[in-house]
Image (tube, helix red, strand yellow):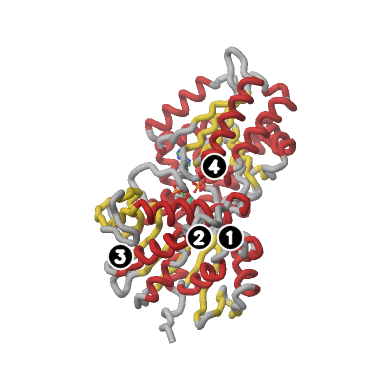
């Protein structure tokens, strides 16, 4: 069997905590198959020169981690300015937040070349290479230009917007063309695949050749949806652990006579946090029985703090949460517990299980793993209810969740109220259906399906 080589910007020791869907899912997937994981070390070499860097090697269980420090200039232009400041907002339908003039594109190209150069030196001829996410879209094109003929697949963890939105990106043509250097491209949802297909046919004049194939630039590319999942067994086992049980018992006793709602994410404008807090405030106003009872624990861990839009979001949330507690709080009860920190992963299942309702209401999300983790953590005999944005990729699979439009404050509040009042039998029924789905389409299913499809692609074609 050929060796699996995974490449992503963010990597994490699979045995440790990581906030961010990509690192969590890849850690779990790689741990199961072994192989090599190549990416940024997370460190900045303050005296390093742009386009250069030394690799570090480390063994983490079955996985060999090979990482690269980035120079300050590369980090800022490739990661902060272009990946986080341009690609992330555009791919999440937020043209208003993209800083198109930051000049990060030069660093983005340079770091992709650097990754390709360093990676090439580690590759064996029969390796199978799997590249992840928007930071590394042109990586295969760089590898091919250096003569690599291995099979290379790409998975986009975030959404792909409609063609005319993508076309706002000054480099859209170059970027989307470079996808044709891969053998297989995977997206999270059918909606994303549809957007790709419209872009490929309208903008690139690619030809549909059947069987998920698109032909352009002398190359046939396979394109399919592979919705990412979680490791349900691992997460449930974590829930049996001491830390999760203690968390659960603590919260159950603190909130014995109250109703607990929970939200967990990185602090990101894609997650719809201000809209969620406003819906929660409307819940307290429109359904006064929740006054003195409904409590929302909102965890929003620090993320990309040196990007302006994230600093602005933090200020907005701090002011909004202060206003809600000021308006509705009582001497012995605060409606909102807003925490701007990480929760240790081993405690998370306890937090989820203690909650009557989870609010997973992004404005746009590739998939959203928190929704799936919440379902996995519930007690099937007395499960909590998932309130899920219809704009999360997970909404395509999780039809038994209560789905909302997070921009519609009043109806989101109404749906939260419905979730809080849902009879036990309906909760059990919905939970059983959701659990069955996330089990059937878990992270192993995702990995195996993608890699099978990649292995089944035609032998890589030689450049003419
Ligand atoms: P994203 O990839 O945009 O961060 P996902 O919901 O797909 O969103 O994945 C987030 C992952 O990171 C989940 O596994 C979740 O448990 C973890 N995570 C997110 N926020 C936190 C937090 N504040 N504390 C601990 N873990 C977190
Ligand atoms: C999302 C992206 C990942 C990214 C993660 C955390 O999950 O899809 O590629 O790693 O957010 O963001 P960060 O910028 O800290 O890597």
Residue picked out by circle 4? 375
Disc 1 crowd, CA 10 A, few/some/many (<14, 14-19, 20+): many
Residue wearing tag 3: 118
Q: Earlier in the sequence, mark 3 or mark 4?
A: 3
On residue 462, which mark appears? none
- The reply, left or right, for residue 140 in relation to residue 195 is left
Estimate the spatial distance between the alpha carbons at disc 3 and disc 4, rounded to whole Å. 40 Å
Real-space Cα separation, disc 1 to disc 4, in angstroms: 26 Å
Question: What residue would you read off at disc 2?
Answer: 156
Numbered disc 4: secondary structure: helix
Separation (CA) of disc 2 from disc 3: 22 Å
Q: Residue at x 58, y 56 (%)?
A: 90
State the image coordinates of residue 311 (x, y, percent, origin top left). 52, 39
- x, y (%) of residue 229? 50, 52
Quick one: quadrant of the C terminus? bottom left
Local secondary structure at mark 2 = loop
Relative depth, front residue between 324 and 381:
324
Measured as percent of width and height from the top left, residue 227 is found at: 53, 57
Ligand 2 under 8 Å from disc 3 Cβ = no
Q: Residues within 10 Å of mark 3 (few under 14, many from 20)?
A: some
């Amino acid at each position: 069997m050929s060796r699996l080589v995974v490449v992503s910007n963010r990597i994490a020791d699979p045995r440790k905590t990581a906030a961010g869907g990509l690192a969590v899912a890849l850690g779990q997937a790689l741990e199961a198959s072994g192989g090599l994981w190549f990416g940024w070390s997370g460190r900045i070499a303050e005296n390093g020169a742009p386009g250069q860097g030394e690799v570090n090697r480390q063994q983490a269980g079955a996985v060999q981690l090979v990482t690269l420090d980035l120079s300050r200039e590369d980090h800022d232009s490739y990661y902060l300015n272009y990946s986080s400041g341009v690609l992330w907002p555009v791919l999440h339908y937020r043209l208003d937040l993209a800083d198109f003039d930051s000049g990060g594109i030069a660093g983005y190209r340079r770091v992709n070349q650097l990754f390709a150069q360093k990676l090439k030196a580690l590759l064996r001829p029969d390796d199978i290479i799997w590249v992840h996410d928007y930071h590394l879209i042109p990586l295969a094109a760089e590898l091919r230009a250096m003569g690599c003929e291995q099979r290379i697949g790409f998975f986009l963890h975030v959404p792909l917007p409609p063609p005319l939105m993508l076309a706002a990106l000054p480099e859209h043509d170059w970027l989307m063309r470079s996808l044709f250097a891969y053998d297989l491209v995977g997206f999270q949802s059918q909606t994303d695949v549809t957007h790709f297909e419209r872009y490929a046919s309208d903008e690139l004049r690619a030809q549909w050749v059947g069987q998920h194939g698109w032909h352009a630039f002398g190359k046939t590319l396979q394109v399919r949806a592979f919705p990412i999942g979680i490791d349900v067994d691992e997460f449930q086992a974590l829930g049996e652990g001491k830390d999760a049980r203690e968390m659960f018992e603590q919260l159950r006793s603190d909130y014995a006579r109250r109703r607990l709602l929970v939200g967990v994410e990185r602090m990101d404008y894609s997650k719809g946090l201000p809209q969620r807090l406003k819906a929660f405030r409307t819940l307290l106003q429109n359904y006064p029985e929740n006054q003195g009872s409904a409590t929302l624990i909102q965890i929003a861990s620090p993320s990309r703090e040196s990007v302006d839009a994230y600093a602005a979001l933090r200020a907005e949330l701090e002011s909004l949460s202060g206003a809600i507690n000021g308006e509705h709080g009582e001497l012995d009860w605060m409606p909102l517990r807003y925490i701007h920190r990480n929760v240790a992963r081993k405690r998370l299942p306890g937090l989820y299980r203690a909650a009557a309702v989870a609010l997973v209401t992004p404005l746009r999300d590739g998939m959203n793993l928190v929704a799936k983790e919440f379902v996995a953590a519930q007690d099937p005999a007395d499960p909590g209810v998932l309130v899920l944005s219809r704009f999360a990729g997970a909404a395509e699979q999780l039809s038994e969740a209560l789905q909302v439009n997070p921009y519609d404050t009043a109806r989101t509040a109404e749906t939260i109220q419905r979730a809080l009042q849902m009879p036990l039998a309906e909760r059990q029924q919905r939970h059983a259906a959701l659990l069955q789905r996330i089990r059937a389409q878990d992270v192993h299913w995702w990995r195996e399906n993608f890699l099978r499809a990649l292995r089944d692609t035609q032998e890589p074609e030689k450049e003419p």
